[in-house]
Image (cartoon, helix red, strand yellow):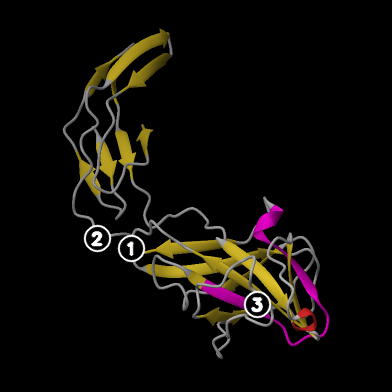
Amino acid sequence: MLRTVDRAGRRWVRPALVLLATLAALLAALATRTAGATPPFTPVADSYVDTGQGARNFGTATQLRVDGSPEQRAYLRFDPQGLSGPVTKATLMLHTNSGHAGGYFVHGVKDVTWGETTITAGNAPPLDPAVTDESGPFATGVWATVDVTALVRGPGPVSFALVTPDSIAMSLASRESGATAPQLLVETSGSADSQAPSIPANLRSTAVASTQVSLAWDAATDNVGVTGYRVF
């Protein structure tokens, strides 16, 4: 029996395909589409500004600094694309270079046109007044997270700013840090999809040992996308 599953979780049962090997075996191939899954997004731009150095830009730094005195604010911009449906949850993750007893607060930033290598304390865009979420205390070398679902409404550019009222500075990894670059995780409800994947045709087998059979088949197709198969 051949069974395919689409992103919406529907199972589509196909006529049985009988494969004869050492023993007659009934095999099921499952073509799957992952519901609401997107890879983590990394920033398209990030930097921080320092009111004590109003004209200086820190866009190429490997860290994002946040401090209450003198005020330092971190800015990040993401451009999530390829979402399969309405956003159900969005999580911003920052890797910590230092621990902090108070953590950071995240605000939305309506302006999504600021430049990574041109933003300074003198020209930085204003923050939305409301706090979207706060990280709480964190240790060194961990991923500190905040819920930014209220700010990520769908595909397209979105900006965040990180602030703290605490006079003790914190250091977070920037996108220039490589493996510890900030991440935006976006979960969706999946697209409204009523079309089944096509039947994976031409199932073939080759006996490679008395207890092993090698299988092959023509790929299934789908209007949203097939991501894999499971063979039972």
Give the alpha-carbon distance from disc 1 to disc 2, as whole Å: 8 Å
Q: Tell me the residue at 59%/69% (across/down).
A: 76
Crowding around mark 3 (Cα neighbors within 10 Å: few <14, some 14 to 19, many 20+) is many
Lateral position of residue 197 relative to residue 109, left or right: left
Label 1 neighbour load within 10 Å: few <14, some 14-19, many 20+:
some
Is 135 included in the stretch rendered in magenta? no
Residue 162's disc is 3
**Is disc 1 in contact with disc 2, using a CB cutoff of under 8 Å?**
yes
Query: 175 or 231, which lies in front?
Result: 175
Mark 3 and mark 1: Cα distance apart in space: 28 Å
- Tag 2 residue: 192
User: Looking at the rendering, which quadrant does residue 215 occupy?
Assistant: top left
Which sits earlier in the primary sequence, circle 2 or circle 3? Answer: 3
User: Which secondary structure, mark 2?
Assistant: loop
* Horizontal side, residue 39 vs residue 60: left or right: left
What secondary structure is found at the residue carrying circle 3? Answer: strand
Q: Quadrant of residue 187?
A: bottom left
Q: Earlier in the sequence, mark 3 or mark 1?
A: 1
From which residue to which does the magenta span run?
159-177
As drawn, 127 above or below 24: below
Within the magenta stretch, is there residue 174?
yes
Which residue is the extreme one toward the right? 168
- The kind of residue on which mark 3 rests is Leu
Q: Horizontal placement of 109 versus 30: left or right?
A: right
CA distance separating discs 2 and 3: 35 Å
Task: Say which label, 1 or 2, has the lower sequence index.
Answer: 1
Q: Nearer the viewer, residue 115 or 158?
A: 115
Q: Are marks 3 and 1 in contact (CB under 8 Å)?
A: no
Q: Quadrant of residue 135?
A: bottom right
Q: Disc 1 designates what residue?
A: 85
The residue under the point 24% across, 43% down is: 222
Task: Check the image and name the residue furthest to the left.
Answer: 15
